[in-house]
Amino acid sequence: MREISGLLVEYGMTQFEEIVDIYQNKSKEKKLSFSLSKISKILGIEISSSDVKDILKRYGFEYIENNGVFEINVPFLRLDLVIEEDMAEEIGRILGYDKVKGKISHMSDMWEPKINETYAKINWARNKLLNEGYSEVITYSFCNKGEIEVLASASDKKLLRKNLTDGLKESLKLNQLNAPLLDLTYVKIFEIGTVFLKDKEEIHVAYTNKKEIKEISLEEYTKSAESFLNGLAGVGDPENRGPEKMNLLMKFNPWSIFPFIARDIAVWVPEIVESNQVYKVIKENAGELVVKGPTLFDEFKKEGKVSYAFKLVFQSYERTLTDAEINEIMTKITNKIKENNDWQVR
């Protein structure tokens, strides 16, 4: 304080009042207790009483020891010393962290792992649906229809959903737009999530089929999971998928940011003509803009002839395609087909 006062005098501040308070008041000192056994356990090495005493003396800490338990007076500037772990850090730093050797503990010696029943059911349901060719979606929990209202939320998201079906319907509409690009006859999607009812919360499973969306509680859906009774999710596990499906999952192709255009073409040919012959003509004249197809999606016979209907999907990785240029390609395909006198474009 004398040195600080001298600096103030040097810079022209010469008026001082009497000292009214001294912060370092012995009666206000904090005390901290720690044991040798606890410090040794935290650091993972045996600490001796002489080591700790030497460190405390080097710090200038006042202390009392009783059977391996130390109590120190914490200096008022050491606001970081509050609990035993703080002293363990100080002692470890002085001794040297190179003496603290890492050791992996055996968790089985500490606790017995337990299966989370809800998570196991969710995992079983998810793997089962994925194995059946479904794709998972995640929709909003907040919506404009429901029984439970939340505070300070957007007007169209102020309620918690009471079912998964409404959200899945919207997701289905969006995904159906890309069905031709993905070579899908119909979109198969599912969601597993929480719904919020007046008196409870439930986890539901919802999935699409050709005609409707089915929604059921997770408990009901997993009743058929015999393997789950043993705490396993063997049915539908990724490890149990066939090699063809695993290879499909491992492949990745970049997608275009530009929209696609889908076109269909149907051809009448004699019954003796196979579909792959028509496919070959279309493929050879479709050009490089075809990203999917030709895909045969319809076939029927009538009066000695057979009709083959193919779908083609055009897309560019560099620009947005126009109807005019796709019409030109389709005209080229049509003209090539007409060169076979007994072939006719429907």
Image: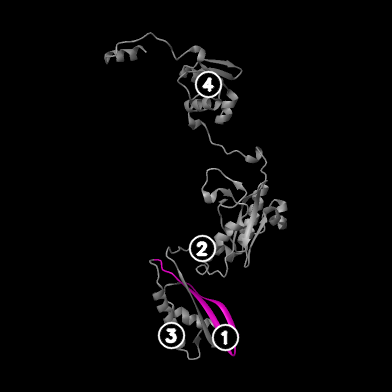
Q: Position of residue 208 (x, y in %)?
A: 61, 63
Along the polypeptide, which appears first: circle 4 or circle 3?
4
| Secondary-structure class at tag 4 | helix
For the residues bearing labels 1 and 3, Cβ distance under 8 angstroms: no
State the residue position of label 1.
306
Q: Position of residue 96 (x, y in %)?
A: 48, 29
The magenta stretch is 291-317
Q: CA distance from mark 4 to mark 3?
A: 95 Å
Q: Nearer the viewer, residue 96 or 258?
A: 258
- Specify the quadrant that holds the N terminus: top left
Q: Residues within 10 Å of mark 1 (few under 14, many from 20)?
A: some
* Amino acid at circle 4: Val
Q: Position of residue 217 (x, y in %)?
A: 68, 54
Q: CA distance from mark 2 to mark 4?
A: 60 Å
Q: CA distance from mark 4 to mark 1?
A: 95 Å
Name the outermost residue toward the top: 18
Counting every numbered tag in the picture gives 4
State the residue position of label 2.
251
